[in-house]
Image (tube, rainbow, N blue to C red):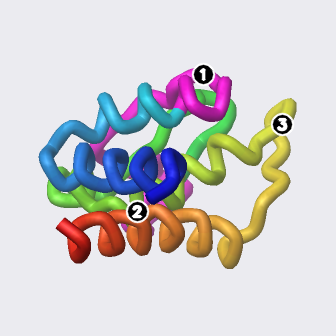
């Protein structure tokens, strides 16, 4: 199994193990970007969304505490952090979902072979 698949599986494992901040630190190191902050409670402008990334604050906001351990949501919002350049978002929702799914599929591949 490739190192990349093992890395992705480890990130999902950390999130599921309630170590989301450590997962974000590892992602920041891996992609050579600053680690985003993680906060529970949505900014007013984002209302009922489950999560969002605010580039001006370099922060991932989540609507509730349970979402801190949701790999798809954490990875989706990290993708937005990764694809933000000078305050402008360069990615799409579709690509953010694909980014998150790649990590989840790697986790499933590793855990099914164990």
Among the 4 quarters of the image, the one containing residue 64: bottom left
Q: What residue is at 40 percent from the left and 51 percent from the top? A: 6
Rendered location of residue 80, percent (x, y): 65, 51
Per the image, the residue denoted by label 3 is 85
Horizontal placement of 36 versus 93: left or right?
left
Q: Tell me where residue 109 appears, x and y as whole percent.
A: 35, 73
Is residue 49 found inside the magenta-colored segment of the image? yes
Q: Residue at x 61, y 52 (%)?
A: 79
Within the magenta stretch, is there residue 24? no
On the image, numbered disc 1 is attached to which residue? 34
Spatial separation of the CA atoms under disc 1 and disc 3: 12 Å
Mark 2 neighbour class, 10 Å CA radius: few under 14, some 14 to 19, many 20 or more: many
Find the magenta span and give its range: 28-51
Q: Which quadrant would residue 96 be assigned to in this image?
A: bottom right
Gap in angstroms between the C-alphas marked 3 and 2: 21 Å
Looking at the picture, tell me which residue is in the foreground, 93 or 5. Answer: 5
Badge 1 crowding class, 10 Å Cα cut-off, few under 14, some 14 to 19, many 20 or more, is some
The residue at the point 35 percent across, 37 percent down is: 23
Residue nearer the viewer, 26 or 72: 26
The residue drawn where x is 43% and y is 26% is 25
Label 1 element class: loop
Residue that badge 2 annotates: 73
Tell me whether the residue at label 2 lies in contact with that at label 1, contact meaning CB atoms closer than 8 angstroms: no
């Amino acid at each position: 199994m490739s190192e990349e698949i093992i890395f992705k599986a480890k990130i999902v494992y950390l999130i599921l193990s309630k170590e989301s901040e450590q997962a974000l630190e590892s992602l920041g190191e891996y992609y050579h970007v600053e680690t985003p902050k993680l906060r529970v409670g949505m900014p007013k402008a984002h209302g009922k969304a489950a999560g969002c990334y605010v580039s001006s604050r370099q922060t991932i906001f989540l609507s509730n505490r349970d979402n801190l351990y949701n790999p798809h949501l954490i990875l989706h919002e990290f993708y937005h952090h990764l694809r933000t350049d000078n305050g402008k978002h360069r990615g799409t929702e579709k690509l953010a979902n694909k980014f998150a799914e790649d990590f989840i599929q790697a986790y499933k591949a590793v855990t099914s072979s164990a």
